[in-house]
Image (tube, rainbow, N blue to C red):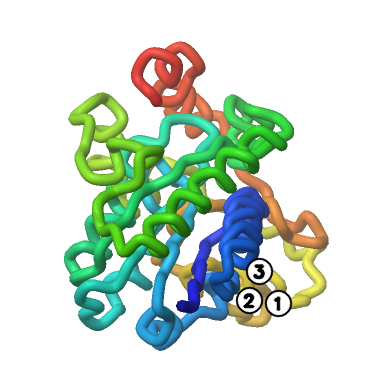
Amino acid sequence: MNITLIYFSQTGNTRRIANAMAEVFCESGYPARTLSLKRASPRDAVETDVIGIGSPCFSSQAPTPIKNFLHSLPPIPGKPAFVFATSGTAPGRVLYDLSSILREKGASVLGGFLARGTVRHPAPCLYGRLPDRPNAEDLAEARRFAREIAESLANGRTEPVATSRPDTFRLHGGFYDFVALISTDSALRLLMPKPKLNPAQCNRCRWCEFECPVHNIELKPFPVIAGECIRCYRCVNGCPQKAYTVDWRIGNLIVYALYNKTFTRWFGT
């Protein structure tokens, strides 16, 4: 029985969780491979015996690229599956988003796992929150979850594993579920500042064009961000030349109003 873990990761947090789980599956006798979303195709999900889907949390929900990938899958009736995510603030409905689409496709979802990850969102009020996560304890918990999945597969069980988070299968109906509901891509384009390119610092290396998760950047002759930006700020954080800047004077106030530490402590889980 082969296991494929397909993950979307921009800073490496979710990739580390995927790798930790894959190690456990291999130790348990299940050949496992990890595959970044950029290199994955629906065929990878169809041909594997068990599928794991991993994602960071954007605005208390699963990001558009991973949801689009899951929606593109054909029906996979009865295929065992599990989901995992990383979050540095309030996870909201991220696990539910992943599992609900898989269940719509007919998959048998065995559980969901959440780890904390260092925040790399460039809003000043967020950047660097939860430093050095996922840490050794987070990775150990990911391995424990993977062992439970492996045991369920070995015993032919289809019910959720004991350590699965409840929000994998049902929404809390809380504050951050509402935040996720209103944080559509179009709303984020309206409320969050758009990255601005400084042509004097750009050498047209095309890094941002390749790395944009929604293929929304094109060289004309310098990079141009088109109209489908999801405000993930991958171009800002990763540009080798530091050619992108963002004016956070208003956007940081909006982010702080929703994701200040008091609110995330009270309403985030």
The residue under label 2 is: 210
Report the Cα–Cα distance between label 1 and label 3.
5 Å
Image vertical order of residue 256 relative to residue 180, above or below: above
Residue 188's x, y, as percent? Answer: 38, 46
Q: Would you say the residues marked 2 and 3 are in contact, meaning their CB atoms lie under 8 Å apart?
A: yes
Residue 205, x across and y down, in percent: 77, 76
Residue at 41% across / 69% down in the picture?
51
Q: Is residue 25 visible?
A: yes
Q: How many marks?
A: 3
219 left or right, relative to 30: right
Return the residue at label 3.
208
Q: What type is the residue that disc 3 sits on?
A: Cys
Q: Is residue 198 above or below residue 260?
A: below
Q: For the residues marked 2 and 1, what is the alpha-carbon distance in whole angstroms? A: 6 Å
Q: Element type at marker 1?
A: loop
Q: Are marks 2 and 1 in contact (CB under 8 Å)?
A: yes
Percent across and percent down for residue 165 are 35, 38
Compare residues 57 and 167 and report the one nearer the observer: 167
- The span from disc 2 to disc 3 (Cα, nearest Å) is 5 Å
Residue type at mark 1 is Arg
Q: Is residue 202 left or right of residue 162?
A: right
Checking the image for residue 206, the label placed there is 1
Q: Secondary structure at mark 2?
A: helix
Q: Position of residue 91 (x, y in %)?
A: 41, 36
